[in-house]
Amino acid sequence: MPYGYGFVVLAFQFGEGKGREMMYVSNANRDDIVKAMEEWIDHTENTFGNDTGKY
């Protein structure tokens, strides 16, 4: 991992309903993870799989 990079790994249960869990492992602060996830969602929500314009 290059210096200055953060990572997060999410683990979640498939399916729907109450009681499902999501866990994460990271080297970053929670606030930084939330900000990165919001940016990723904003960037990929409508272009995921086509962010290069090739398709």
Image (spheres, helix red, strand yellow):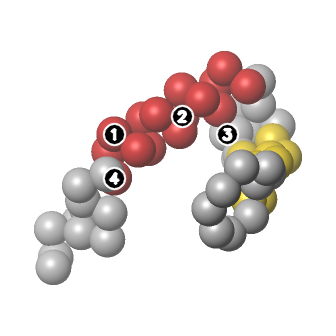
* Residue linked to disc 1: 42
* Residue linked to disc 4: 44
* Residue linked to disc 2: 36
Which element carries disc 3, helix, strand or loop? loop
Nearer the N terminus, badge 3 or badge 1?
Answer: 3
Write the residue at 34% across / 39% down. 42
Which element carries disc 1, helix, strand or loop? helix
Q: Nearer the viewer, mark 3 or mark 2?
A: 2
Q: Is residue 38 left or right of residue 14?
A: left
Write the residue at 32% across / 45% down. 43
- Binning the other alpha carbons within 10 Å of mark 4 as few (below 14), some (14 to 19) or many (20 upward) gives few
* Residue linked to disc 3: 5
Q: Quadrant of the C terminus?
A: bottom left
- Callout 2 amino acid: Ala
Q: Tell whether label 1 touches label 4 (CB within 8 Å).
A: yes
- Binning the other alpha carbons within 10 Å of mark 1 as few (below 14), some (14 to 19) or many (20 upward) gives few
